[in-house]
Image (cartoon, rainbow, N blue to C red):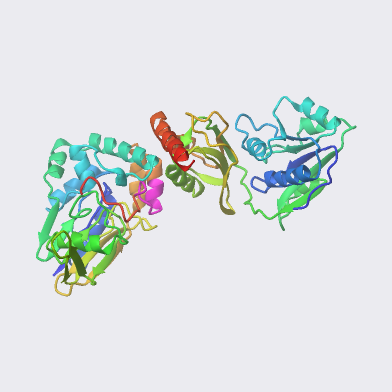
Amino acid sequence: MKIAVMSCIHSNYEALDAVLRDIDRAKAEKIFCLGDLVGYGPEPHAVVEMIRSLDIPTVQGCWDEDIVEGLNSCECSYPSVLAEHRGRFAHEWTKEQIYPDTIEFLAELPKTMMYENLAFVHGSPHSQHEYLLPELDGFIALERVLSTGADTLFCGHTHVPYVRSLDAGQLNIRVTGTKENQDSTFTAPLKRIVNAGSVGEPRHGRPNATYVIYDTDTEEVTMREVEYDYQKTCAAIIEKGLPKIFAWRLAKGMEYAERADDASHLCERGV
Amino acid sequence: MSNLKNESQIIAIAGLAGAGKTSWILQQIQIAAQTSAQQIVYFAPSSGTVAIDANLVAIQFPDVEILSDGQELDLFTRVANGAIAYVELGFHLDLAKMPLLDSIPESLSYHKVAVCPRGRHYAEFQSWADRVVESDLDTAQISSQVQVWRSPLTGQVFDPSSLNVFWYELTEGGYGEVYRCKGIFDLADGRAFYIDYTKAKESVYVELRLPRWLEGRPQRFSGIEVVGAGLDNSEMIKSITDCCLSDEIIQNYQQQIKRSQLISV
């Protein structure tokens, strides 16, 4: 069975609409969404309404959580004061735009979903705010997958799609403090992390939306990059009073505000 | 770029934005400083309160006397007394209407130098200059709809990561088409940098030979100049403001630096 996994829509309705049409053409039978429905973009309510109306199973993203609970993230969310100013502005703007029942919907989203041997999270199983960057230490990456009990972990948050196979899963552990130090070796089966990229706020240098199709029978992952009329989104950003630089950055495929790129940083909010 | 013989004179330098006028002047000053004790004067007419080039010259050569608008007669007096004066003419000035150059006393030696990118010929400068100096800096031809936007930044301290992001957005067209931009910026660790961009080359970052400023907001010049078309001034101001640090953060940084300096001593 083909499933579609998408993430990080960020209030970009045009991108979401184009991805849903592409999923339809690809004949995926189920869709999973990894959160960040809102934030930065101009159409938070329309995006949430679309996800709700199609009853798409969705986990809560960091932006969704922040809209519900208020900003309380560690430094990894904002690698510069400029990014922090922009993020806070977008947060306040989004809060003003969405309706109370939308906030209720976001509040009720689960942090993790399971489907057969697949797990779905926004950032990592530990926190919606934690980045599983492709260069993350292999031991930590493997631990994050193992903690879910799944063979394949789908995540988003970094806005850059990737597939990482953790096939060197040999763990050597030394237990100290007993009479004799004990060494144990475990061999973990093949695990994978699949990052679905971003529908509405790509970071790959082009404005196109990205998501993945996964075949549960063959375990084949197909990265999809979808063109859409991003200029409509850019126009809406300007019309609705969001910073014009967001429109320029979206057109360049650069995200609205730059993100963390330190693979060794573990989010303090979640660990 | 070749140098001129040191003698008492006024040398007026013109050229496109980013052609290398200031670089050529700095080179001449360097040579003069090494070979004679002759007084050197620098003057950039109509550069206003955001005189980035003048401040750059002053930082790199503290012995050079910097004159500003209203001190034209002083310039003539200095040269009459044996100084050499470099007069840098901004690309935006009309070379045919330069009252300063027209009023230079006949008794003073006066030369006009045009700085042009190597292999490029511009009739406007060639017909004006006594001598054309070819620079290795390339620069794009500027449209007739050119805008110049300047802002003083004295007292502002930048978060380096934010400044990097803003500079990238600026030079890649996030605030309109930019042909040329330069600035002097104070950073959180007390250092100051000169950043220089022209459309034809990568940005250049130069740490300035200034003492680290570790006591509150820097009371020394910093500023930015942007030359382009369709510039969105209000968005630039917003982003620059968002790059700057609060008093509290500046104080924290300065305390950390001072502590680390004590430890290293």
Magenta span: chief secondary structure: loop
- Name the residue located 11 percent from the left edge and 59 percent from the top edge: A114
Evaluate whether residue B97 shows in this view: yes
* Furthest residue in direction front, as rendered: A179
B116 or B204: nearer the viewer = B204
Residue B36: image quadrant is: top right
| Magenta stretch holds residue A258 | yes
Q: Where residue B168 sits: x, y (%)?
A: 47, 48
* Furthest residue in direction left, as rendered: A116
Q: How many marks?
A: 0
Q: Where residue A51 sits: x, y (%)?
A: 17, 51
Q: Is residue B24 above or below residue A133?
A: above
- Name the residue located 49 percent from the left edge and 29 percent from the top edge: B215
Residue A243: image quadrant is: top left
Q: Is residue A200 above or below residue A173?
A: above
Left or right: where B87 falls relative to A228 = right
* Furthest residue in direction bottom, as rendered: A218
B24 or A52: nearer the viewer = B24
Question: What range of the chain is rendered magenta?
Answer: A247-259
- Name the residue located 65 percent from the left edge and 54 percent from the top edge: B138
- The image quadrant where one finds the N terminus of chain A is bottom left
| Magenta stretch holds residue A265 | no
Evaluate whether residue A42 shows in this view: no
Q: Is residue A12 above or below residue B43?
A: below
Q: Where residue A88 sits: x, y (%)?
A: 31, 37
A174 or B153: nearer the viewer = A174
Left or right: where A110 falls relative to B50 = left
Q: Where residue B23 sits: x, y (%)?
A: 68, 46
